[in-house]
Image (tube, grey):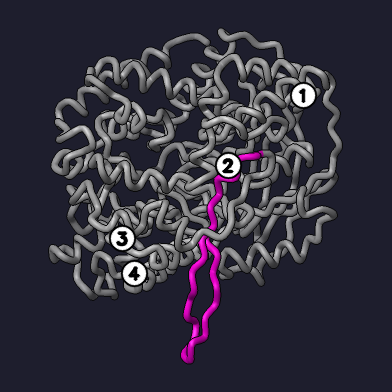
Amino acid sequence: MLNEKYIKILYIDLETEKIRIEHREDLLPFLGGVGIASVLFKENVRHEYGPTAPQQPIVFAIGAGAYIFPVLTKTVAMFVSPLTGELGESYAGGRMAMSMLMAGYDALVITGKAKKHSYLAISTNSVNVRDARALWGLPVSKTGGAVREREQAESAGKRSIIRIGPAGENGVAFACVNVDTFRHFGRMGLGTCMGSKNLKAISIHGNRSIPILNEKQYFKVYRDIFKRCTSTDFMSKYHDVGTPINILPLNKSGGLPTLNMRANKFEHADQISGEAFAEKNLVRKMSCTGCPVGCIHIGMYRNEFDKGHEYEAVSVGYDYELIYALGTFIGVNTTDQILAIIEEVEEHGLDAMSTGVCLGWATEALEKGIVSLDDTLVDLKFGDSKGYIKAIDHLAAGTNKFYKALGRGCRYAAKKYGGEDFAMNIAGNEMSGYHTGYGSLVGAAVGARHSHLCNGGYSLDQGQKEFNEDEFVEKLFAEECERCMTNSLIMCLFARKIYDRQTILDALNSIGWNLTNDDLGAIGKRIYQTKLQIKNMLGFKQEDVKLPKRFFETPSLNGILNEDTAYRMIKKYSEKTEALLSETL
């Protein structure tokens, strides 16, 4: 809490509708963000129950510098993942971090199950559980509009609304949570956790005024960071074409997962590149509140909603991961078709990457006769966007046994029907858009949340000159610890080259912290150790991770990967985490 020597937590029990507030000085050594979220989650998680049991907590936390400095814009959520059965961890931008700060809370801990469909209205001076029975079943966009109209906050700029769609209500294990229309808690199934608690949405509004005590030093640091964000090349690619600029270079180098990763290049990549989206569809760029960069790219396409040339113009956010998962991975080759699929995924409240990878597996499984048309209900074919949109409707609704199984992730569906060798998941989490080498594969396997963003292994692959597995393991481990520290700020990872250690120290110490470089290193290790303890509590065992054979059949950016090498690297990494668990920090 800015200007205070404690962390302020709001606890909400949805079943009893009781709240309590704690001021925790003991959480200060964890800084903020994922640090305090990890401790609070560890304190409240119930390992004896399943992921969606009412007793399980959902924890939201903002970073130590949230909204106060440029690009420190994210909120972290921690929960038991319905997709993997272990640690769920997800990040979202938008206005939520600012709204929590202005409402006066560093963290929210939500437990219990509401007696009826509900949403939460949190403000500086009140917490209310509202009736959401009329909102249940609504798509994401209509839910946001309805909550916005009901709450009528004093200032929309200081309010954030997060909400789920039908997929979260229906228990799809990778349902996401929409944040302020164009941002998301995307991966691992937070939407399902909210749905299981009868929680449709959360509205947060704050109106505090917070003074800066050392204005001179603060503004000096702020101006320096702002200048580097806006006047250097560090962030220019994120503003210009955005992350879709990755499509063409990854395609050229052979690291772009295509057609359920039967290939590492897409023959139509130029038609759906970032440049193509910019020329054909880009209409707007936006920023999360507190960020000057403008990396959110909004594309527009025409949707024919009735006969007789009746069209509507639909605006949809897009980025590299969505173009990969709902484009190259399932063979869709026009920008308009990809935007139409993204819109369907958005309205149902599904994670885009898991949806695309699951559809890729289902398409190939149908081709091979592992499942039948009676199962899929749609004649799934690579490149058929209309068929995929119909399948997404079935997936979100859980129309039949097949779609209920697919809604638990491709790992689960493949165990039930077959085709595990090409169900492209890593420890239950559907793969990201990088088939670049051992860094991307092993990094996701050992990462705390099995994401490419845990340790940036894909970046190591792209920068490697000579491969040395021991050096790779060391670098993955060091970066995982470092990102635990930066995610306590919480810094958008796009700004990782701007927020070096000295910049972080200058920023935090200008607002009242008294930290050294050694302190930052200790914070990262302390947080990572806490995450590992949580994973152990939830029964995760690294040696149980089995990687689909296709990872070792389709060439990566760095050539064919060797299965023995990958598992040996996982073992070496696990030895390092075991050593960290035994340390006294």
Q: State the residue position of label 1.
A: 219
Q: Secondary structure at mark 3?
A: helix
- Badge 2: residue crowd in 10 Å (few <14, some 14–19, many ≥20): many
- Relative image position of residue 257 (x, y in whole percent): 27, 48
Query: Which callout, 4 or 1, points to the residue nearer the camera?
Result: 1
Is 480 located above or below residue 53 in the figure?
above
Q: State the residue position of label 3.
A: 359
Under mark 4, the amino acid is: Ser
First in residue order: circle 2 vs circle 1? 2
Marks 4 and 1 sit apart, C-alpha to C-alpha, by 50 Å
Q: Secondary structure at mark 4?
A: helix
- Relative image position of residue 403 (x, y in whole percent): 34, 65
Marks 2 and 1 sit apart, C-alpha to C-alpha, by 38 Å
Marks 3 and 4 sit apart, C-alpha to C-alpha, by 11 Å
Query: Which callout, 2 or 4, points to the residue nearer the camera?
Result: 4
Query: Which callout, 2 or 1, points to the residue nearer the camera?
Result: 1
**Closest to the observer, 223 or 116:** 223
First in residue order: circle 2 vs circle 4? 2
- Badge 3: residue crowd in 10 Å (few <14, some 14–19, many ≥20): many
Marks 2 and 4 sit apart, C-alpha to C-alpha, by 38 Å
Which of the 4 image quadrants contains residue 388?
bottom left
Is 518 located above or below residue 17 in the figure?
above
Q: State the residue position of label 4.
A: 385
Image quarter of the N terminus = top right
Q: State the residue position of label 2.
A: 57
Residue 507 located left or right of residue 334: right
Is 301 located above or below residue 163 in the figure?
below
Please report the bounds of the magenta region as a residue range: 291-316
Which of the 4 image quadrants contains residue 441?
top left
Marks 2 and 3 sit apart, C-alpha to C-alpha, by 30 Å
